[in-house]
């Protein structure tokens, strides 16, 4: 694999596990103010915070800039709840409906070694901070395409820690048990917390599941098991109205609130087909980001409803060659 191919693999796995957490310790420290006051929970710069590796580096220069591809982008929730957009069921009811729907589908063909996984998505992250007087409006994010090898020996058999090839991830998904509690137990072992982690069980579960939801081509039975496991995550809730994802599509938002945190990670699901649409991080209460040790950078205010990071999956498929499209 040449340098360009390795770069493509890393970009494709923007939200996936990264090896050797010790190398990421500095980035985690730089993001420690992002979770707000009180216990000042750190935002992890590894796989639990999708696609913020670049943002961590820029934080060292007292900015939060685009780290997800495309231009920086942020803003408040774009939907207004109405009676027709109400989500009537509990999180368990909605996710059981989703699981019962998707598990009836026929499984897709299993890719073979030599094929590639194609992905097209929209991603957005916070705009540069602080703003300059001459700053132009942030451009709207544009779709990005990525290709990654289905079977990549460089990411198998533990060679890159818990950063795994799609072939290994799909094998893991095929072996998931039926019981949601047992699924969560296997997922926690597959993606363990880093040494000294202070994450709660619910936070850890959401981080690991958010990676597995991006697996492609997703077996319907596995997706159903992941939905039932998601419903069993401690503290998980479904928003009582449909939201719109970064691509403007209606979505069920299933998220996890942690006491003392200022934001919520949400998994977004199509309310009709119940396919995975993407994820996002949304601010749940007003707070300010501070930059200790940098007197030249003013506090950054956040309002409830602001969107920090967003990912919208637009298309995916299995192709024979890099550059091919489904």
Image: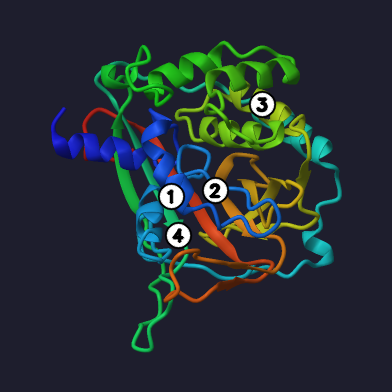
Quarter of the view holding residue 222 = top right
Residue identifier under label 4:
124
Camera-near label (3 vs 2) is: 2
Quarter of the view holding residue 223 = top right
* Quadrant of the frame with the C terminus: top left
Q: Secondary structure at mark 3?
A: helix
Mark 3–mark 1 Cα distance, whole angstroms, equals: 28 Å
What residue is drawn where x is 71% and y is 56%?
38
Q: Residue 43 shows which numbered tag?
A: 2
Mark 3 vs mark 2: which is more N-terminal?
A: 2
Camera-near label (4 vs 1) is: 1
What residue is drawn where x is 68% and y is 45%?
272
Question: Is 255 placed above or below 229 here?
Answer: below
Mark 2 vs mark 1: which is more N-terminal?
A: 2
Residue identifier under label 1:
52
Question: Is 155 placed above or below 58 here?
Answer: above
Question: Is 2 placed above or below 74 here?
Answer: above
Mark 4 vs mark 1: which is more N-terminal?
A: 1
Numbered circles on residues, count: 4
Measuring from the top left, give residue 147's x and y in whole percent.
29, 37
Mark 4–mark 1 Cα distance, whole angstroms, equals: 11 Å
Q: Secondary structure at mark 1?
A: loop
Circles 2 and 1, Cβ within 8 Å, touching? The answer is yes
């Amino acid at each position: 694999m040449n340098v360009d191919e390795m770069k493509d693999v890393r970009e494709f796995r923007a939200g996936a596990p990264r090896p050797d957490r010790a190398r990421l310790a500095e980035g985690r420290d730089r993001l420690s103010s992002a979770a707000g006051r009180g216990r000042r929970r750190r935002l992890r710069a590894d796989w639990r915070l999708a696609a913020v590796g670049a943002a961590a580096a820029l934080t060292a220069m007292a900015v939060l800039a685009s780290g997800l591809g495309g231009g920086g982008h942020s803003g408040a929730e774009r939907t207004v709840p109405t009676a027709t957009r109400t989500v009537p069921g509990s999180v368990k009811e909605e996710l059981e409906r989703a699981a019962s729907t998707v598990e009836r589908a026929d499984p897709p063909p299993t890719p073979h070694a030599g094929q590639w996984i194609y992905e097209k998505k929209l991603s957005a992250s916070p705009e540069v901070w602080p703003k300059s007087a001459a700053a132009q409006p942030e451009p709207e994010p544009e779709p990005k395409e990525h290709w990654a090898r289905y079977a990549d020996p460089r990411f198998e058999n533990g060679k890159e820690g818990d950063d795994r090839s799609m072939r290994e991830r799909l094998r893991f998904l095929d072996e998931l048990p039926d019981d949601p509690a047992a699924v969560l137990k296997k997922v926690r072992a597959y993606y363990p917390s880093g040494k000294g982690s202070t994450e709660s069980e619910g936070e850890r579960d959401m981080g690991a599941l958010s990676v597995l939801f991006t697996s492609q081509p997703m077996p319907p039975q596995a997706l159903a098991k992941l939905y039932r496991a998601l419903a069993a995550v401690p503290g998980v809730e479904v928003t009582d109205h449909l939201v719109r994802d970064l691509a403007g599509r209606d979505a069920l938002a299933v998220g996890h609130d942690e006491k003392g945190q200022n934001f919520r990670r949400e998994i977004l699901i199509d309310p009709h087909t119940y396919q995975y649409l993407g994820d996002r991080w949304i601010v749940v209460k007003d707070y300010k980001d501070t930059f200790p040790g940098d007197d030249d950078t003013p506090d950054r205010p956040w309002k409830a409803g602001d969107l920090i990071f967003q990912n919208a999956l637009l298309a995916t498929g299995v192709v024979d060659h890099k550059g091919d499209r489904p």
